Image (spheres, coloured by chain):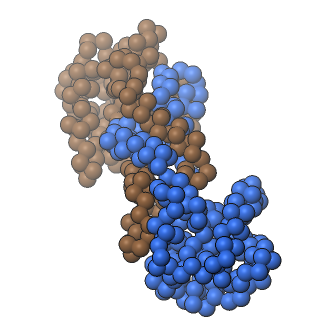
Chain colours: A brown, B blue
């Protein structure tokens, strides 16, 4: 890629870094080149810190056995807390969505983080999202109501619909946060008041 | 940043990775979060490879003593080659610009890579770009003509102007690649024919 004419001095570790940066979402060949030169020329300390942070994160982060969010212990702090309402389980797509919910200060229940949404075109189905683990979590006997808080995108809606069918079949009360968010909008980019409104006006689903 | 309300379970290695990714140019807090979740959830192999590539590059890449480009040895392959014209020295801003020149197949001389351009607002002056090393390189007795091939942006033009004054003061012939490139354009994004044209029509400068 960097030596199409074969004339440019080959520096394999340079090419390897440019290539490795392309694993980041939204980073193409040109961006990867710019990032590489920036790191090597202007921010070697940052590059060193990034390498360390990657390895530390890979080594220490795992999924909470209860909520599936990232944590450094078996059960995350929130799931281990006795101050949360064990009867409410809010299903979100990503960790940032749980943060959006927390920022409303209007929810005291627990979460389940899907780490994605159904997306057949990307090859992400119920198996990839480990729905069985969610069903096991939701039927622990303490959960009374499952609140679907996936995004109001097409994929988020499809995920909510799919989950509602299977959760109701297991005898659970299922609700959906209200469409207080703009159609097509995403939790992550909404202000806390709008998310709070949507939480308050959740409706029976399915 | 990830726990503004202080309520979200703190996972310090997660936050450290999000923070570390922000050293990449053009990556803000939201992008860093997305990249982090993508790496941890969908591409742990890529994250591992990136960490390795960063460390290998940091450990093995240095600047060529003659052209200042990145290399894994003291002198890069091109500078060590006996087939290049020692009397021509082409000054470019970045390694990608040298690649653009090579792709024209119209230049057989050598390069000096500034690794940047004068940019007072970013605190990048003659000292940060190590112009003294360039002057020592250009006055080795073999160089006959210095070709200024910095970009035709404001900063690239200012850099060319500044260099031409000091290089001519040292008795060197100084030329500038022709403005065959569109005004405001950058080498990196031009096609080879246009760059070749600009090289052919270089004019005395200053």
**Left or right position of A133 against A83:** left
Q: Quadrant of the N terminus of chain B?
A: top right
Judge by depth and name the residue closer to the eye, A54 or B97: B97
Residue at 49 percent of width and 86 percent of height: B106
Give the vertical position of B152 relative to A172 (above or below): below
Judge by depth and name the residue closer to the eye, A100 or B32: B32
Residue at 58 percent of width and 86 percent of height: B198
Q: Quadrant of the C terminus of chain B?
A: bottom right
Judge by depth and name the residue closer to the eye, A95 or A4: A4
x and y percent of residue B158 in the render?
75, 72
State the image quarter where residue A158 is shown.
Answer: top left
Residue at 35 percent of width and 26 percent of height: A62
**Left or right position of A19 against A128:** right
Give the vertical position of A148 relative to B197 (above or below): above
x and y percent of residue B79 in the render?
52, 69
x and y percent of residue B125 in the render?
75, 60
């Amino acid at each position: 890629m960097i030596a199409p004419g074969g004339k440019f001095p080959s520096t394999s570790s340079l090419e390897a870094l440019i290539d490795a940066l392309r694993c980041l979402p939204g980073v193409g060949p040109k961006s990867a080149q710019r990032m590489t030169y920036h790191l090597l020329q202007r921010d070697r300390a940052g590059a060193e810190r990034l390498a360390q942070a990657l390895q530390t994160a890979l080594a220490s982060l795992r999924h909470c056995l209860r909520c599936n969010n990232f944590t450094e212990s078996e059960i995350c702090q929130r799931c281990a807390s006795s101050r949360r309402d064990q009867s409410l389980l809010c299903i979100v797509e990503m960790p940032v969505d749980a943060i959006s919910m927390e920022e409303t200060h209007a929810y005291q229940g627990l979460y389940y983080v899907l780490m994605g949404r159904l997306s057949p075109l990307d090859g992400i189905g119920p198996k990839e999202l480990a729905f069985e683990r969610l069903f096991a979590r939701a039927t622990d006997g303490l959960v009374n109501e499952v609140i679907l808080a996936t995004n109001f995108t097409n994929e988020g809606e499809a995920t909510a619909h799919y989950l509602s069918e299977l959760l109701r079949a297991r005898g659970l009360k299922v609700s959906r946060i209200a469409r207080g968010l703009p159609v097509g909008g995403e939790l992550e980019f909404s202000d806390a008041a709008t998310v709070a409104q949507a939480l308050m006006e959740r409706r029976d689903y399915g």
